[in-house]
Image (cartoon, rainbow, N blue to C red):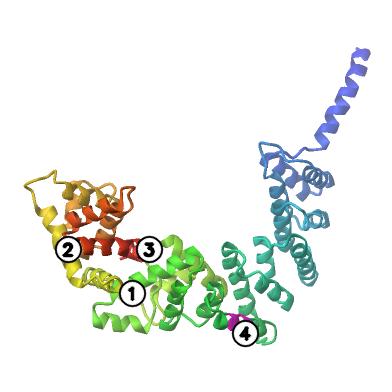
Amino acid sequence: MKLKTRCLFPVILILLAQCSSLAIKDRQTLKIASDEARSGNESAYLAMEKALSIDPPPQSPDIHVKILAELAVLPTTNSVEIIRKYMKDRIPARRGQAVLSFLKNTSIEKKQKEKELLETIESNFQQYSEILPEEIQSLGTIDDQRSLDLLVKNLNKDSQRDALIVQSLGGIFTRSNAAGQTGVASSTENQLVQVASTAEDANIRNLAIQSLKIGYGTEGAARIQEITLNKGSAPPLRMAALTVMGQDMRRAPDAEYGKKLKKAWYGFRSEKDYAEKIVEVLASIENKSIDEMRKILLRGVVKPAPPLRMEYVRQGTPQGLYSLGRKYDISEGVFAKIDSRIQKIMKDETLPQKPEKRTVSAALNSLAPDSDYFQRKKIALGGISERGVLSSILRFIVNTRRSEAWQIMVLRNVCGVSEAEAMKLREFYLNESTTLNRL
């Protein structure tokens, strides 16, 4: 019996050693280590540091980033020392998360934190020639001329990161204005204004900073619409501006209604994914939550927006088409012919399988994917006054792999226009499809 105990003793020691040194391989083991660290177990920090020093397991390739994120909520000197080691790491994901964790860690004094962050980000920019989203976010919390200069220096290099830079600049401007400081932010703000006013192709980021700071009145709406003229606009912001422009076209026909709209701009009511981008920038600059800013945009500046009645929309869609069509020498009479032709095709019950009727019905399927023939017929009988009818038909015909001659032939038959008018319609859709899809 004693012999057996002596033989098992080394095995027991090995098992105890394995239990004392936790190997972090996934979320579950990371949670265990984090709980141990909160209870004051020093070996948990050693386990995290060891896991960061070796290659991540195949089943958890992002475990390093998760460990660094977990260290942000552990306000101890041990966690800070580990984070510091990876703030200049060669791997962008680890470097960015380390900077963000250092920013969020509450165990560091504010001035010391800002000083270290600024020095680290400047060093990283010199070494890697890029600035990461996490570093942009950190710079937005530092009220220092060096952070402003670094943010401005990185504008126009990456359209996806430019929106983050605008948010960070807006946060700094807001804090400096609230504190009554004119020196730190004003010089950089003036620099941005000069860049925007002197450049031949004014950049969307500089326009955004100016337009979003002047409020949400008619002038602010006009400035955001001005973004559409810039060929280098970031796609989400440019699409949002086009959405606003399309809505203005639909609302324009009624004179009294238009006068009310000129007093205040009522924000976005469609294309949520694009509109949210501008809402996020506005919320950041005004130090408000996204929900608060969305409510402000929807209810207007002075008073709630009057409801959009269907007759305004039905009048507005043809008016918007007329204003766009003038650039391509397409008269109102052409749109009137298309309107009557579409209604005539769908009213004709003599030949249910007529090619023109099948084309219109199939084209309108994109407007109402789950609808049947009779529901699509009801939409088509509204003609081009129904939102999306004409754009759906043109898109269905023009966005095919068939030849240009075939497309013109089908446009003639379906729209009831001449060959010359069909060619203009095709060019009209190819050049104005983005705005047309919003009418």
Q: Nearer the viewer, residue 416 or 162?
A: 416
Q: Which residue is mark 2?
A: 339
Residue 190: mark: 4
Q: Which residue is mark 3?
A: 434
- Secondary structure of the residue carrying tag 1 is helix
Q: Position of residue 130 (x, y in %)?
A: 69, 62
Residue kind at label 1, given as amino acid type: Asp
Q: Position of residue 77 (x, y in %)?
A: 83, 57
Q: Main secondary structure of the magenta part?
A: helix
State the separation of the CA atoms marked 3 and 4: 34 Å
Looking at the figure, which quarter contains the C terminus?
A: bottom left
For marks 3 and 2, the one nearer the N-term is 2
Q: Nearer the viewer, residue 1 or 255?
A: 255
For marks 1 and 3, the one nearer the N-term is 1
What stretch of residues is rendered in magenta? 191-195
Q: Nearer the viewer, residue 110 or 119?
A: 119
Q: Is residue 288 visible?
A: no
Q: Which residue is mark 1?
A: 248
